Image (cartoon, helix red, strand yellow):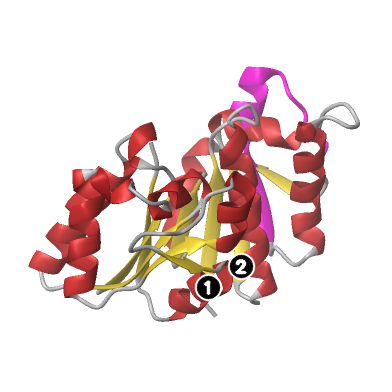
Amino acid sequence: MKRVAVLFARGPWRGVDALAGIDAALAVLAFERDLQVGFVGAGVELLIGADAGDERARRSRMIAALAHHGASRLLASRECLLARGLVPRVADVELVERADFPAWLAEADHVLAF
Amino acid sequence: MRFSLFIQDSPESGAAVASALGFASAAVAAGHALRQVFFHGDGVRCARAGAEDDRDLRALVALARQHGVPLLACSTWLERLGVVAAGAVQVGSLGQWCDALDETDRVVSFRA
């Protein structure tokens, strides 16, 4: 089975990007491909949630659901979170060094960045 | 190698289509094949009537036609953005894109 890596590198204020990435990730899972999801740069802000009712909160919940829908791995850059003073509210996210991302991406058959 | 292209922005919002055209031309010239060109997110605006007024998109469509490569725009995003597909880019689904993954060695994504 081919592995697809979806990388979120832009923050939630980039309206289309996060939603497009979530759509693509859910499609990969729906069609039973191996999905791994990474968060780097401003993309880590997708992991912190937001006030209930906020569009960002909805996206955060959708991202949290990816693991439940079968994503085999969720990982986020520890440095990028620290630099922003953020703690992820999404469970099941591994915190890794930013330097580990190239190797992670290299192991994927396909990479999509949002 | 077989490539599929994943285009996330329209010509109006940046260089995604121009970059995709450059990559596709170089790949084909080097003997590689294209499996599918998929437009997603804001990229589905490439399917609207008149979108091919953009020189880069027109050239990408011509290249795809020449090599029998399907050009598909995500139906969900067409609906979400209120875009009616009326050009050379056909309505497609993420399911078709996922199917193409199995027949593709590498997906290359382009955005502004």
Question: What secondary structure is found at the residue carrying circle 2?
Answer: helix
- Identify the residue at horizontal 16%, vertical 73% (top origin): B66
Please tell me how crowded label 1 is: few (under 14), some (14-19), or many (20+) other residues with Cα within 10 Å.
many
Instruction: Kindly give the residue lying farthest to the left in the view shown.
Output: B29
Amino acid on which the number 1 mark rests in the picture: Cys
- Part of the protein shown in magenta: A73-90
Please tell me the numbered disc located at residue B98: 1
- Determine whether label 2 and label 1 are within 8 Å by CB: yes
Question: Which residue lies at the image location 58% right of the left edge and 28% below the top edge?
Answer: A42
**Is there any visible trace of residue A1 in the rendered image?**
yes
Percent of width and height locating residue B59: 18, 55
Q: Residue at x 57, y 73 (%)?
A: B95
Quick check: B82 left or right of B24? right
Pick the quarter of the image with the N terminus of chain A. Answer: bottom right
**Viewer-closest of B72 and B108:** B72
B103 or B17: nearer the viewer: B17
Q: Is residue A77 left or right of residue B21?
A: right
Q: Horizontal and vertical percent for residue A30?
A: 69, 72
Above or below, A71 against B78 in this view is below
User: Badge 2: how crowded within 10 Å, few (<14), some, or many (20+)?
Assistant: many
- In the image, is residue B112 above or below residue A51? below
Which mark identifies residue A28?
2
Which residue is at 69% across, 35% downward? A46
Amino acid on which disc 2 is placed? Val
Q: Are marks 2 and 1 on the same chain?
A: no
Determine which quarter of the picture holds residue B1. Answer: bottom left
Q: Position of residue A72 (x, y in %)?
A: 69, 64
